[in-house]
Image (tube, coloured by chain):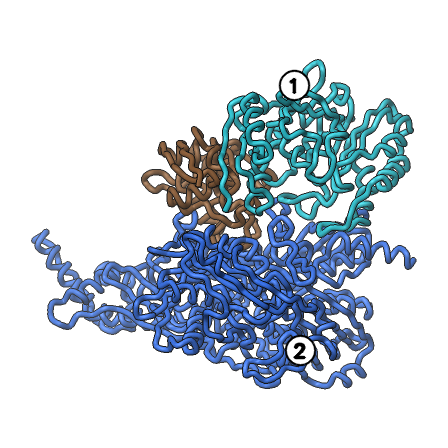
């Protein structure tokens, strides 16, 4: 029968020391919306849960001279209601505001969403398209890992067992990009994406100066479609160019057939939504 | 009509205040002293022979009070065809097969004990496709029937075949004929409250079963029959409903878990509760039956239907519950939706190793109407007739007797079709093929009872006490549809009281008289009619007492007034105006003289009369109580499945406008009009609630909901992957209430519980076709299916 | 079984509970405090029948570790009506507009609506639907629930 200690450390040092003494027997819990479900479904059977909710100072969204900083304990609801995220990191707003329900978003954290490393994580593609860097802290100090290198497989990341994800950094340059994320799902709430597409674009006149395209549920981990990005760079904006980018991105992806969607359909949706999200990103840039 | 005080009014559901304060007690909340918790060990295979069951470890777990397998309880077959035992000991035939059960002091311990039960299986090849299962050389899922006779086929011995007129004549008379294949899948009822029961025996072995049954007297009977076979034939059974968290068909049959709770309670001599988890709700309860149709219809050059021919294959799953009887309801739309002279319909139910099926709102009608109404659209196109026009040409009308011998009394179908057409701006919007389209579908359903049992009656006991409180003991059940309000309105109106005075008690076999159950959209109609009869009797009793007591009260009053005021002049009262019960009436709790209604001396509260009649001090005191039993003047279906099984029929039409995203295959509903002939709306707000709710489930049936089975296993047993719609999906349903004043209905009302669901999915399918020229004939209409069909269509070009 | 002790404010009362550390808030409310309003419809945060307010925010109590309510304020449907039994405008509106049918989702639905109206007294339909999107209902099709919330908002405005 499931039985665990519920540990509530007050600061990171205490987290590290608990992680050290419990090792693999402990699981970190932030909002708990995944962990508690996994325990109930018997996918997890920890001897201890180490709660990160005591680290209240890691729940923030702010902008500094060196870029945007999002604390790992920021809830989806915080991102959704942040005017900074809404206006300057719009794709992240799209992703965060469509996770589960208000009840879930009130407690689920962005750090948890990323560390859970589901291919379907709704904040993963937006953060990838915004060039986010994950800041990990361990007993020996901090290290920074670009999100492109963060995921190593389904439910797997580069986070070492004695490390805690503390922050995402987004370069200030990304503020000049327009961005948008589409969650393709059967329902408008309480759903996982069949496919997620995030696009961020920087434009000068008619020329696409820079682009990021990120995809969820298109591969074993959330991914960037870098060939499509490279294709777009320097091109003159047109429907044809965006459609072509969608095709390239679809080719880069390696989605699978699952209960939630067929691979061919997912590829089609990449083709469909790369241009649509590009248009939405540009529209937002215009209206800023 | 306008003189009604309560009928037709939007009376609030104040009677259910407990539901908005958290105090309503559902099975989830109910506890009995000393209660244990039961859990079920299910099969790990879709089809396997059980070689060995070892419960020793489970029995040793502290807190466990009983572990039972098929070896510990009598080998008694249960179910509609008696094709399963409560616990399976030789063979499992589906993943939900109950192999063992545990009672323990907590649900966790019971669950852990289930995990400790070791079962050794020898896997057998499974049959998951009804067509495979029908093949002559297919392995048999059941070897013998209930009487031990060998079974030679997986096709169930059920005679679902309907014939009327002459199909060949119909074909000859046809100018146009279409043939289609149509498919519907498993859907779950998704009651928000999960299933459960508490079984409790007293020391005389009498059982009280707290459960959610919606036909409590049949439930009692099935349990009595079971008792007779397990040596408890002298035991009494009482069924008690707590508040029910949704039903939608799930509570029509007595489920296996209820027999298991009974066995655990017998063994432990303690109350035992079994409460399903959501996952069990999805994989261990019988869902709506999937059906595969072939349907052919024809019409003459004027669009008059000439014949309708259809065959259905129903995946029955491993055992038989009410799902296997849905063809009897399918016959109704097949034979009687629109005027069609020549009809042939047959249905085969086939055993497979899939989950077995039960009833769900509409009971076979949604499946069959999907076939009929998508085919109607196809036929309209073939004949070059506007689909709405084709429906109007063949519209049912009052006075018709259909090929099934249904006698159509009131019928608002024409009004429904025309109403929806106008609201949708049909003529302007149809036929554009520009990604936007309109579609419609109609329905016929029983709406004045359904004589599926030999009694379709409802018993009601009404008493009025000296405080003026009206207690009503209904033999029926309430599942949240609003009966405590709607029936209170009928009773208040008929009795001359206020709805707030009425206290309705449902769902207890000890207090209620027989009722054939809250199903088949029959409750308001049947219970309403019983209420009218009982009210008439009670009212008569009150007025008879009033004739005696009112003059006494008046004399007392005059005496009192005289005492207060010596100058008081005695009024000149004509007591002949209140001399007979017929001279009196009751309105708003007040007894008054019909001939002199405003005379204050002739007006008094009913409670005054009843108090006087009770506290008489002579040995001649009176109380007021009456019972009524209403059984509608209908007939059972005969051997040919013909007969007027309902007093009246519901008609309705759903019309939708959709927008299809041709790049994603997504279907968006822009407008949905649901026009329903309800006879008379007792409470329009409540009626709309039924139409909204049923419409929403219908949209789910059409677009998003499906239980995904892989080799017999339910792959999506949760709300994340079973796509029931959310508030955010915002389907713009607009109900249109059409009143036809049904002569046999209580205040003109007909049933409306199920109809809203029935035509929704075909209306959507027809609108999708109008939008993009692609017919999706298998439900649900998923984006993948739409996109695939569009691609194929483009290829063809 | 490892146990923990938590103290928090429940419907206005300062309370303390000693329960297994594995328990979630819902179980603590239902089994320790014998409160029946919040329901378990799924146990995994997918239906919203267990919705309660923690420090004014709607959460699924079925996946909320009880250890985390220490020092917080929890409000369930039981804490809504006035001490004299006066119904909250939401409770009244749900009864008047048929926002209730079987009632199983109602406690959670009303709590989600309460969190919304406390934060935004004048929500539009879309905001209401977003706020209720985590509360599944099988009976109503949500239309009359949304209407009930709109009516309650009007009542609350008239009052203040």
Q: Secondary structure at mark 2?
A: loop
x, y percent for residue B237: 37, 70
**Which residue does the image show at 78% across and 35% down from the upper left?**
A223
Chain C as rendered: colour: brown
Q: Chain of mark 2?
A: B
Q: Which sits in the foreground, C128 or A58?
A: A58
* Dot 2 and dot 1 within a common chain: no
- Mark seen at residue C101: none
- Mark seen at residue B155: 2
Quarter of the image where one finds residue A65: top right
x, y percent for residue B601: 21, 60
Chain B as rendered: colour: blue
The C terminus of chain A lies in which quarter of the figure?
Answer: top right
Q: Chain of mark 1?
A: A
User: Which chain is the one coloured cyan?
Assistant: A
Q: Which sits in the foreground, C51 or B319?
A: B319
Residue B175 sits above or below residue C71 on the image: below
Residue B135 sits above or below residue B191 on the image: below
Q: Which residue is mark 1?
A: A141
Name of the residue lying farthest toward the top: A65
- Near mark 2 (Cα within 10 A), the count class, few <14, some 14-19 or many ≥20, is many
Q: Secondary structure at mark 1?
A: strand
Q: Which sits in the foreground, B691 or B582?
A: B691
**Which residue does the image show at 18% across and 64% down from the upper left?**
B612
Separation (CA) of disc 2 from disc 1:
70 Å
């Amino acid at each position: 029968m499931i039985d665990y200690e519920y540990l509530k450390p007050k600061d990171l040092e205490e987290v590290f020391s608990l992680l050290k003494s419990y090792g693999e027997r402990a699981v970190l819990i932030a909002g708990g919306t995944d962990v508690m479900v996994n325990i109930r479904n018997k996918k997890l059977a920890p001897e201890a849960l180490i709660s990160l909710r005591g680290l209240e100072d890691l729940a923030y969204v702010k902008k500094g001279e060196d870029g945007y900083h999002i604390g790992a304990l920021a809830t989806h609801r915080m991102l959704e209601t942040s005017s900074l995220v809404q206006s300057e990191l719009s794709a992240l707003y799209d992703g965060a505001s469509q996770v589960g329900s208000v009840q879930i978003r009130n407690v689920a954290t962005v750090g948890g969403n990323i560390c859970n490393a589901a291919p379907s994580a709704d904040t993963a593609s937006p953060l990838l398209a915004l060039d986010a860097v994950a800041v990990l802290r361990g007993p020996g100090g901090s290290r920074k890992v670009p999100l492109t290198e963060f995921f190593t497989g389904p439910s797997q990341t580069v986070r070492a067992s004695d490390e805690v994800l503390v922050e995402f950094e987004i370069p200030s340059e990304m503020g000049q990009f327009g961005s948008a994320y589409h969650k393709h799902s059967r329902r408008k709430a309480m759903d996982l994406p069949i496919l997620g597409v995030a696009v961020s674009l920087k434009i000068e006149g008619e020329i696409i100066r820079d682009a990021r395209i990120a995809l969820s549920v298109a591969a074993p981990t959330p991914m960037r479609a870098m060939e499509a990005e490279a294709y777009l760079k320097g091109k003159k904006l047109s429907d044809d160019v965006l459609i072509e980018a969608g095709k390239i991105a679809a080719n880069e992806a390696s989605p699978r057939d699952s209960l939630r969607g067929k691979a061919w359909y997912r590829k089609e949706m990449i083709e469909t939504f790369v241009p649509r999200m590009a248009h939405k990103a540009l529209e937002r840039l215009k209206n800023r | 009509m306008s003189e009604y005080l309560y009928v037709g009014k939007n009376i609030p559901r104040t009677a259910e205040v407990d539901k908005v304060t958290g105090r309503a007690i559902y099975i989830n909340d109910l506890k009995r002293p000393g209660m244990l918790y039961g859990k079920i060990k299910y099969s790990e295979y879709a089809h396997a022979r059980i070689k060995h069951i070892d419960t020793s470890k489970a029995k040793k777990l502290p807190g466990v009070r009983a572990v039972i397998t098929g070896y510990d309880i009598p080998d008694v077959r249960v179910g509609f065809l008696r094709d399963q035992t409560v616990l399976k000991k030789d063979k499992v035939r589906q993943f939900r097969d109950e192999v063992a059960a545990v009672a323990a002091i907590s649900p966790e311990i019971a669950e852990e004990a289930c995990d400790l039960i070791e079962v050794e299986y020898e896997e057998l090849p499974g049959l998951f496709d009804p067509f495979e299962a029908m093949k002559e050389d297919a392995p048999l899922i059941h070897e013998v029937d209930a009487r031990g006779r060998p079974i030679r086929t997986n096709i169930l011995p059920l005679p679902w075949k309907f014939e009327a007129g002459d199909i060949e004549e119909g074909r000859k008379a046809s100018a146009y004929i279409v043939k289609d294949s149509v498919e519907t899948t498993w859907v779950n009822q998704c009651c928000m409250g999960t299933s459960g029961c508490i079984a409790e025996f007293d020391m005389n072995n009498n059982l009280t079963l707290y459960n959610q049954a919606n036909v409590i007297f049949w439930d009692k009977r099935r349990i009595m029959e079971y008792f007779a076979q397990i040596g408890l034939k002298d035991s009494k059974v009482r069924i008690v409903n707590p508040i029910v968290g949704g039903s939608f068909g799930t509570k029509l049959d007595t489920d296996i878990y209820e027999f298991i709770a009974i066995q655990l309670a017998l063994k432990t001599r303690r109350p035992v509760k079994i409460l399903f988890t959501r996952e069990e709700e999805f994989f261990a309860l019988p869902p709506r039956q999937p059906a595969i149709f072939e349907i052919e219809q024809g019409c003459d050059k004027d669009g008059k239907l000439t014949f309708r021919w259809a065959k259905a294959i129903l995946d029955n799953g491993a055992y038989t519950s009410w799902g296997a009887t849905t063809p009897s309801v399918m016959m109704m739309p097949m034979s009687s939706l629109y005027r069609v002279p020549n009809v042939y319909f047959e249905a085969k139910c086939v055993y497979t190793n899939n989950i077995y099926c039960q009833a769900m709102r509409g009971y076979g009608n949604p499946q069959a109407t999907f076939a009929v109404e998508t085919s109607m659209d196809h036929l309209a196109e073939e004949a070059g007739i506007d689909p709405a026009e084709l429906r109007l040409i063949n519209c049912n009308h009052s006075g018709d007797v259909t090929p099934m011998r249904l006698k159509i009394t009131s019928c608002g179908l024409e009004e429904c079709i025309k109403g929806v057409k106008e609201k949708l701006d049909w003529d302007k919007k149809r036929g554009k093929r520009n990604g936007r389209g309109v579609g419609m579908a109609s329905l016929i359903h029983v709406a004045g009872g359904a004589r599926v049992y030999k009694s379709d009656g409802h018993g009601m006991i009404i008493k009025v006490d000296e405080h003026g409180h009206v207690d009503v003991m209904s033999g029926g059940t309430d599942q949240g549809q609003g009966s405590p309000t709607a029936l209170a309105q009928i009773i208040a109106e008929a009795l001359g009281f206020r709805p707030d005075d009425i206290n309705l008690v449902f769902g207890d076999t000890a207090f209620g008289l027989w009722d054939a159950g809250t199903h088949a959209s029959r409750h308001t109609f049947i219970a309403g009619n019983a209420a009218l009869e009982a009210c008439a009797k009670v009212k008569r009793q009150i007025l008879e007492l009033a004739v005696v007591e009112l003059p006494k009260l008046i004399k007392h009053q005059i005496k009192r007034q005289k005492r207060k005021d010596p100058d008081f002049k005695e009024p000149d009262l004509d007591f002949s105006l209140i001399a007979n019960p017929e001279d009196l009436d009751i309105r708003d709790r007040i007894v008054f003289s019909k001939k002199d209604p405003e005379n204050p001396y002739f007006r008094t509260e009913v409670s005054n009369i009843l108090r006087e009649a009770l506290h008489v001090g002579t040995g001649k005191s009176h109380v007021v109580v009456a019972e009524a039993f209403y059984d509608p003047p209908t007939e059972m279906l005969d051997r040919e499945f013909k007969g007027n099984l309902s007093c009246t029929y519901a008609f309705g039409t759903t019309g939708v406008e959709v927008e299809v995203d041709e790049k994603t295959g997504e279907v968006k509903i822009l407008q949905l009009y649901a026009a329903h002939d309800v006879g008379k709306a007792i409470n329009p707000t409540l009626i709309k609630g039924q139409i909204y709710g049923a419409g929403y489930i219908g949209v789910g049936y059409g677009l998003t909901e499906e239980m995904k089975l892989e080799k017999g296993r339910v792959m999506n047993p949760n709300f994340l992957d079973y796509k029931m719609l959310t508030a955010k999906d915002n389907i713009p349903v607009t109900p249109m209430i059409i009143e036809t004043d049904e002569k046999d209905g209580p205040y003109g009302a007909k049933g409306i519980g199920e109809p809203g669901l029935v035509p929704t999915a075909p209306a959507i399918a027809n609108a999708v076709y109008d939008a993009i020229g692609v017919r999706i004939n298998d439900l649900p209409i998923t984006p993948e299916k739409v996109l695939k069909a569009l691609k194929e269509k483009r290829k063809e070009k | 079984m490892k146990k923990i002790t938590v103290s928090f404010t429940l419907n206005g009362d300062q309370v303390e509970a000693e329960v297994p550390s594995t328990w979630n808030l819902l179980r603590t409310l239902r089994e320790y405090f014998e409160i029946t309003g919040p329901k378990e419809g799924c146990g995994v945060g997918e239906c919203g029948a267990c919705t309660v307010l923690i420090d004014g925010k709607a959460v699924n109590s079925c996946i909320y570790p009880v250890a985390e309510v220490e020092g917080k304020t929890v409000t369930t449907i039981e804490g809504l009506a006035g001490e004299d039994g006066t119904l909250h405008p939401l409770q009244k509106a749900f009864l008047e507009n048929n926002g209730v049918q079987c009632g199983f989702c109602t406690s959670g639905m009303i709590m989600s609506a309460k969190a919304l109206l406390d934060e935004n007294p004048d929500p539009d339909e879309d905001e209401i639907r977003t706020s209720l999107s985590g509360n599944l209902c099988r009976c109503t099709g949500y239309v009359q629930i949304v209407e009930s919330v709109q009516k309650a908002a009007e009542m609350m405005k008239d009052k203040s």
